[in-house]
Amino acid sequence: MRIKLDINGLKREVEVEPRTTLLDCLRDTLGLTGAHAGCEHGVCGACTVLFDGVAVRSCLMFAVQAQGSAITTIEGVTPGPGELSPVQDAFCETHGMQCGFCTPAMILTAHALLANNPNPTRAEIVEAISGNICRCTGYAQIVEAIALAAERMRGANRPKDAHP
């Protein structure tokens, strides 16, 4: 069946089977491989995308369910080519990633959190990312990255390489 999707601000029309998950549509049909297939049961969070600004597991949704909604993947959070979002920049600065498998999902979850709560407590950050499993970092740098991004987005802290 033919469906129309709004992916990263671009209107796309694709042919999918009714049973195709949003994850498979993004990766296999549209070539957007930032959302990762981890458990494919909605447990690990590696497939997280933003669905109308809310972090959701794309492995648990059918692509047809995304019609009429705005989907944002990791490929769509950058301000422009060759640029990083404040969250991505903070992850780099704090070493909030190691193998990188969970990183896109963590960054999207952080974007959703900070869009609704620009000044989260550490406990709120931990709660927000609790559905995203990371086997490498122990979460400390991820929490630090999200807190730093929140500060920067509020204008309370400037990146180390920022010019006055």
Image (cartoon, rainbow, N blue to C red):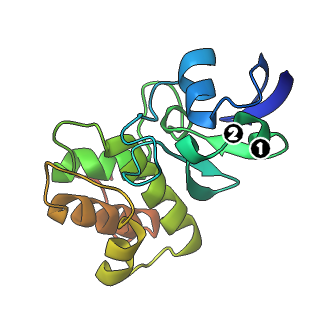
Instruction: Residue at 16% x, 41% y: name it.
Output: 98
Q: Residue at x 23, y 65 (%)?
A: 144
Q: Are marks 1 and 2 in contact (CB under 8 Å)?
A: yes
Side (left or right) of 89 relative to 80: left
Amino acid type at mark 2: Phe
Q: Secondary structure at mark 2?
A: loop
SS state under label 1: helix
Residue 45 visible, this angle: yes
Q: Mark 1 — residue?
A: 65
Return the residue nearer the eye: 36 or 20.
20
Q: Which residue is mark 2?
A: 62
Q: Position of residue 145 (x, y in %)?
A: 27, 59
Kindly identify the amino acid type of the residue bearing the numbered disc 1: Gln
Badge 1: how crowded within 10 Å, few (<14), some, or many (20+)? few
User: Badge 2: few (under 14), some or many (20 or more) residues near its Cα, within 10 Å?
Assistant: some
The residue lying at 43 percent from left, 33 percent from top is 83
Residue 133, image quadrant: bottom left
